[in-house]
Amino acid sequence: MTGAAAPPTLTLEWRPERAELAEALRALMRLRRGRRTAALLVGGLGVAAGVWALGQPVLSWLPVVAVTAALVLLPVHRLAARLAWRRDPRQHVRHTARVAPGSGVTLTIGDVSSTFRWSAFTGVLETEHLYLLTLPRGRRTSVLPLPRRAAEPDDARALRAVLTAELGEPVRVR
């Protein structure tokens, strides 16, 4: 009995766009939002309790707390993407990803190449324009973005099938 042929390695090529970088950062921020909101709430309660214990009127501190909350909660992904876009020349060169079923992903940026086994990823997120392969980094999460536009229509279906088989069904992030 002959085994089924292994799915072919998919090759994706693209030049990054700043909007895609912002989309990836926005998705990461949404992943972290729960932890950040809890920390903000605990910090705000601590400040309010300290102000109350000192006998200061809480309402005089309300603008400070409100501005701090706004700065922490406002999405800054566009600004972060703009800064990364300007500072990192690798964002402007051609990227190539070879997605090998059963093996992993090899990403080439310019003349630098990195290979990631499937076991290195903890999952896959799906946005409107990207697949984001999640990589744990201590207490933080980073992602390896694969733009959907980099794949031909037939390859796009095959890419989703490989990602689903290797990492599970992509989690949709809006």
Image (cartoon, grey):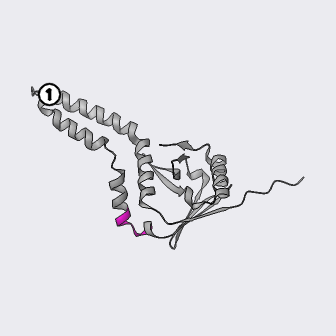
Under mark 1, the amino acid is Val
Q: Please state which of residues 135 and 93 is positioned toward the viewer in this rendering.
A: 93
Is residue 30 toward the left or the right of residue 146 in the image?
left
What is the span of residues highlighted in magenta in the rendered image? 85-90
Q: Is residue 10 above or below residue 168?
A: below
Q: Residue at x 67, y 54 (%)?
A: 158
Q: As drawn, which residue projects farthest toward the right? A: 1
Is residue 55 toward the left or the right of residue 7 in the image?
left
Residue 153 location, x and y as percent? Answer: 64, 57
Q: As drawn, which residue projects farthest toward the bottom? A: 111
When asked about the image quadrant of residue 159, the answer is: bottom right
Q: Residue at x 23, y 31 (%)?
A: 46
Residue hosting label 1? 58
When asked about the image quadrant of residue 47, the answer is: top left
Q: Which SS class for mark 1? A: helix
Residue 89 on the magenta span: yes
Q: Residue at x 66, y 58 (%)?
A: 155
Residue 103 location, x and y as percent? Answer: 66, 57
Q: Please state which of residues 162 and 79 is positioned toward the viewer in this rendering.
A: 79
Residue 27 location, x and y as percent? Answer: 44, 47
Q: Please state which of residues 66 and 51 is positioned toward the viewer in this rendering.
A: 66
Is residue 145 toward the left or the right of residue 25 in the image?
right
Residue 23 on the magenta span: no
Q: Is residue 103 visible?
A: no
Q: As drawn, which residue projects farthest toward the front? A: 153
